[in-house]
Amino acid sequence: MRHHIAVIGGGPAGLTFARVLHRHGYPVAVLERDPAPDARPPGGTLDLHEGLGQLALDKAGLLTEFQALSRPEGQAMRILDTDGTVLRDWSPRPDDRANPEIDRGHLRDLMLGPLDVQWGREVTQVVPGKDREGALVRFADGRQETFDLVIGADGAWSRTRPAVSPVIPHYTGVTSFETSLDDVDTRHPDLARLIGDGSVAVYGVNRSLTAQRNSGGHVKVYAKFRAPLDWNANLDMADVEAVRSSVAALFDGWAAPVLDLLRHGTSFIHRPLYVLPVSHTWTHVPGVTLLGDAAHLMPPLGAGANLAMLEGAELAESLANGPGDLDEAVRAFEERMWARAGRWAKITTAGLERLVSPDPAEALALFDEVQPS
Ligand SMILES: Cc1cc2nc3c(=O)[nH]c(=O)nc-3n(C[C@H](O)[C@H](O)[C@H](O)COP(=O)(O)OP(=O)(O)OC[C@H]3O[C@@H](n4cnc5c(N)ncnc54)[C@H](O)[C@@H]3O)c2cc1C
């Protein structure tokens, strides 16, 4: 394969694509907006499923390293009632490797390995060529470059997507705040016990609070609730204490240890949940395609990074092993990606409806349906 290929974005999709292509001996330009790998906090923990994210890591030759870094015990899940009563308390068997957790930063470093990522290369536009002639990439610094194939793995607000589809993400009606606890085992031992080895979740009417252990005693806490997009119009988002008390007020009356998850949280990151329409597809455009959230942004219910990684691995394999017709390989890949992502988008959309629901019993029922007993 002698094609000049660029992948835009060094997230799970872009890095897996580049890593698998690299394993087959082919170069790819990874164009990443962040100025450096540690330019911003990498985010929380990801559970990688056996048939999805772990399969992608296997295709990249990284499964053994992943197993050494991941936390199978992080699959543990406890559900409390709003008064603190334990409703479910599930722990994985010691040999359970179905969905182990890994910190995003650890996964990124594992994937980066020998890759030569071009940091600080923010893409502003991708223009498909005329007569099936690759695509032009424009950068924020005014430069531009042409490639035989441009792969948009640039996430929810992709700058590549407009080259193939006019669709933009829409708000789900659920908003989310993320906060963190550090050194939980020494600073907040009661909360450490409440969270256990994995996650604790509490579901109320149209709201939920989840705390999830990362490595090194770090915990991410997520408060989700149904609200109009402008619910915070009169809130000074830079005022941590004002945000804390506004968010905590939404959980008024919940058990004190549960509210302590918010009381001890450090900063608060606001994340309204946006999605692309279920089964988002487009008319194939030679020279450009999408992977991961850029193609199928869906509610964050444990599938997005897994799909992004498997797509990256599969596209790389089909380009490396295919008959040589770049366009045919991409076209066939897109059909497969759309079918699988469409199924997961339906599952996660229905899941969000049940996890942030007027009837909290729905969340418990969903847990019982998916969790092995
Ligand atoms: C709170 C939360 C928890 C989640 N938990 C899970 C989980 O447990 N399991 C799971 O499978 N999924 C989970 N997800 C979903 C998962 O994070 C995403 O689906 C996944 O990160 C998508 O990967 P991606 O590579 O497509 O996009 P991204 O991770 O968004 O990466 C895109 C990359 O492109 C770069 N970029 C963006 N714009 C440009 C540009 N213009 N030019 C150049 N570079 C650009 C970005 O800097 C970034 O590095 C969660 C999501 C959230 C919000």
Image: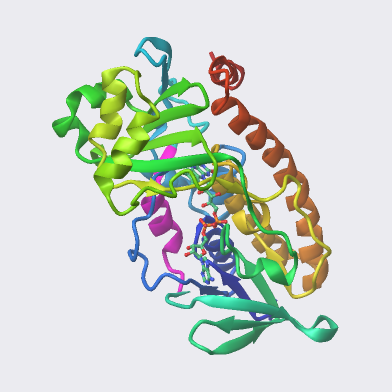
Quarter the N terminus occupies: bottom right
Q: Is residue 105 magenta?
A: yes
Q: Where residue 87 sits in the image (x, y, percent)? A: 44, 11
> Residue 329: horizontal and vertical position, in percent?
78, 65
Which residue is more in the foreground, 108 or 293?
293
- Relative to 368, residue 23 above or below: below
Q: Which residues are magenta?
A: 101-116
Q: Residue furthest bottom?
A: 143
Q: Quadrant of residue 148?
A: bottom right
| Nearest to the observer: residue 173 or residue 46 | 173
Quadrant of residue 247 in the image? Answer: top left
Residue beneath the point at 24% across and 33% down: 263
Residue 282 in picture, x, y percent from top left: 80, 60
Decide whether residue 157 is among the magenta residues: no
Residue at image point 36% right, 31% down: 211
The image's colouring method is: rainbow
- Residue at the (29%, 36%) spot, across then down: 245
Taking the view exactly as shown, the residue that stands out farthest to the left is: 186
The residue at 71%/66% (across/down) is 289
